[in-house]
Image: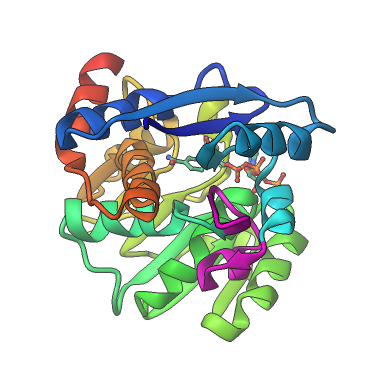
Amino acid sequence: MTDRYAVIGNPVAHSQSPMIHAEFARAGGDDIRYEKLFAELDRFRDVVGAFVKTGGSGLNVTLPFKSEAFRMSDELTERASAAEAVNTLTFRDGKVYGDNTDGIGLVRDIVDNMDVSIAGKKVLILGAGGAVRGVLEPLLAEKPAALTIANRTLIKAEALAHHFAPWGECRAVGYGELAGQGFDIVINATSTSLNNELPPIPEGLFNARTLAYDMVYSKGLTPFLRRAQSENAGMLADGLGMLVEQAAESYFIWRGKKPDTRKVTHMLRDLLS
Ligand code: NDP
């Protein structure tokens, strides 16, 4: 029987997940069906329930339902439990298993695809929203020398630093406090690039050894990556690799197979250009 999966969100029409998973399945010779599921804001559990009843095996969860997916999980992995957010649901033997693959997706893109070690590095993450919550535990597990969270609303960065203290030390700062500091890895996890804007970073964060990483992916360079380029950052990357890697980890959770991500990333890159 064909195994069924889907991505659930609101909105969901823009999601690349069906294309990515279809490609993983095609390359691996797997027989799966992967759909898009739209849920009204107050109907998440109903839509999930109907999907499970009709034989659905797993769901990717996107905005704004990651917290609700966390709450409806019977069992959680440590990284999902730390994030208090779930992007991968598995339905097995009447139970709901919740995981969060966003952080491992980011780490694999940096460490495996770009061959950049996070261990011992000075890492700066910009933003303190859902994306940062999803990636902090896997980033801290790589043992950076220091991890700084900068956010426009300082109290949100402070709350994250406090919440993740059991997994490692994070320093929460406002953008003004970044003046005069340099970093080995700077990750833009704000939504500014979606509006073609730059987070209010001071000059001088980047040097020739810095990896500048924007979680948003786009056809050309985002304003953040243009700024990093103008300051001669050593490496520039957008979030397309993270998107594909987090999907690959979901695929692995569901099917026990690690897909070849490079081919799919290249295919999506071609489609973007
Ligand atoms: P949220 O809405 O939860 O958080 C947005 C963050 O951006 C907040 O920290 C907010 O600061 C900050 N921000 C927004 N506008 C500005 C501005 N003008 N100046 C400074 N800071 C600003 O979004 P998410 O955390 O869920 O997502 C962030 C980005 O990451 C999105 O663009 C998303 O597309 C991307 N993403 C990419 C993934 C991938 O696989 N590549 C996976 C997940 C996310 P404040 O708290 O002060 O409002």
- Toward the right, the furthest residue is 42
Does the stretch in magenta take in 96? Answer: yes
Q: Quadrant of ligand 1?
A: top right
Q: Quadrant of the N terminus?
A: top left
Q: Is residue 264 left or right of residue 127?
A: left
Please say if 210 is above or below 244.
below
Q: Is residue 197 left or right of residue 248?
A: right
Q: Is residue 2 left or right of residue 37?
A: left
Observer-nearest of 8 and 186: 8
Observer-nearest of 25 and 53: 53
Q: Position of residue 137 (x, y in %)?
A: 50, 70
Q: Quadrant of residue 3?
A: top left
- Which range is magenta? 74-97
Q: Residue at x 69, y 32 (%)?
A: 50
Q: Residue at x 43, y 68 (%)?
A: 138
Please say if 19 is above or below 216.
above
Observer-nearest of 58 and 153: 58
Residue 254 in view here = yes
Residue 232 in view here = no
Q: Is residue 89 left or right of residue 225?
A: right
Q: Position of residue 258 (x, y in %)?
A: 23, 51
Q: Residue at x 67, y 64 (%)?
A: 74
Q: Quadrant of residue 218?
A: top left
